[in-house]
Amino acid sequence: MFDYLIVGAGFAGSVLAERLASQQNKKVLIVDTRNHIGGNAYDHYNEDGILVHKYGPHIFHTNSRDVFEYLSLFTEWRRYEHRVLASVDGQLVPIPINLDTINKLYGLNLTAFEVEEFLASLAEPKDYIRTSEDVVVSKVGRELYEKFFRNYTRKQWGIDPSELDKSVTARVPTRTNRDDRYFTDTYQAMPLHGYTRMFDQMLTHPNINIMLNTDYREIQNIIPYKEMIYTGPVDGFFDYCYGKLPYRSLEFKHETLNEDVHQPQAVINYPNEHLYTRVTEFKYLTGQEHSKTSIVYEYPQAEGDPYYPVPRPENAELYKQYKALADAEPGVHFVGRLATYKYYNMDQVVAQALALYAQLADRPTWHPREDLPAKQPVTPISNGSNGSNGSNGSNGSNGNRSFTAASSNGSGRSATPVAAGKAEQNGKSH
Ligand SMILES: Cc1cc2nc3c(=O)[nH]c(=O)nc-3n(C[C@H](O)[C@H](O)[C@H](O)COP(=O)(O)OP(=O)(O)OC[C@H]3O[C@@H](n4cnc5c(N)ncnc54)[C@H](O)[C@@H]3O)c2cc1C
């Protein structure tokens, strides 16, 4: 008899499996319909030996020290700060919009102070912000909205931003300085050997059994268990009794090119041209050295795997009905992005899973694993350090610390410290 049947081996399911097995000595069976662990964060070496993310680029960033330290039990990290360029008016310019974006686009030479005035002169303030269009136009005006946001959003969502809830672009980060990082979270890093290796480490425990290529429905009446943790689609759990919750999907077109470097930045957004929204070159993310390079195009579409819940009021209402059923379902815990019909970043899902674990285990927080070798000495270093050894005595108590990762792993890549940025929750989706 298993204590828990866990449906889904993504972040939500894997964190709970790991915690319950290692801390509570629970016997866990984790099942996934896919032929791999890791959920959407799954990465693998393709036939040319290049590490790629099967379901589109996954960049780890968080402001949560707890989440970062928890994941550090299972991986070393490589420093990585994400940067994106947008192809606009025949030029590649930084996005989020910053001082350089404006100067390049308009052939100007404004200072930070002047660009603030410039943006303010473009903005069209609105009394009431209802839609995504309102959010952007009120902040940067119609011209920049048309150049950067309107068509990108239309492609991404299949709906004009004027019909999309304001929550989709709740905040349009514009910077009057030259900071061209996509995220400003305190912790920004990529698992040194990739996500799948990290999941492997989490799920390697004698109390954890994994069944891949398996829908939980195939085994739920055959294999006995006490409670279920469900991370699949909530509407599917209830046989779509109120109808399907709408999702936006993506088709990923992977390519490997016979060149060392393909594009000048990890991601290029294409707001206005092409059917795809963006192109990612993986070597920027992974730091891998290889004579070839692999890229992925993302084509938004209505049908396919469920990726982005469509944030419209009627869908929120529909989800409420499913949530009422979920809340009343005995012995089943719904957690993760599909089970709660909400777009979450990876760190948010980890935090959600750790919170559920604390509830199940009646323990206030997560506890480190004593059985694991300290593969990742998490040592505070000061901001701006060159990260040589992180032994500068900073106590890291300001919540803005950065961490050294363990040293080289024999793969030829070495771990470097994670840069500290201004702690800021930007809630951006990917
Ligand atoms: C294109 C894209 C890019 C993203 N990029 C980023 C990023 O850069 N940074 C970031 O922080 N976040 C990113 N995210 C979000 C990230 O993917 C999620 O936060 C994370 O994967 C959620 O984990 P999860 O466990 O909730 O869901 P999932 O990873 O989806 O795991 C759920 C698992 O349940 C399985 N399952 C479903 N139904 C069943 C069933 N009936 N039986 C058995 N198994 C089942 C599924 O196969 C799946 O493997 C991105 C998401 C997308 C779509």
Image (cartoon, grey):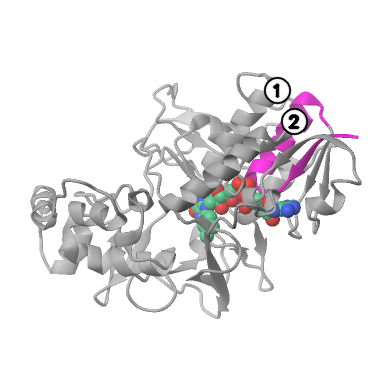
* Residue at left offset 21%, top offset 63%: 144
Residue in front for this viewpoint, 159 or 379:
159
Residue in front for this viewpoint, 3 or 67:
3
On-image quarter of the C terminus: bottom left
In the rendered image, residue 19 lying in the magenta stretch gets the answer yes
On-image quarter of the N terminus: top right
Residue in front for this viewpoint, 427 or 158:
158
Instruction: Classify residue 150 as left or right of residue 80.
Output: left
Instruction: Classify residue 336 as left or right of residue 421.
Output: right
- Element marked by disc 2: helix
- Element marked by disc 1: helix
Residue 133 lies, in percent from the top left, at 27, 58
Can residue 194 be seen in this snapshot? Answer: no
Range drawn in magenta: 1-26
* Circle 1 residue: 361
Q: Residues within 10 Å of mark 1 (few under 14, many from 20)?
A: some
Cα separation, mark 1 vs mark 2, equals 8 Å
* Three-letter amino acid code at the position of disc 1: Ala
**Res 20 label:** 2
Image position of 70 with respect to 33: above or below: above
Label 1 close to label 2 by CB (< 8 Å): yes
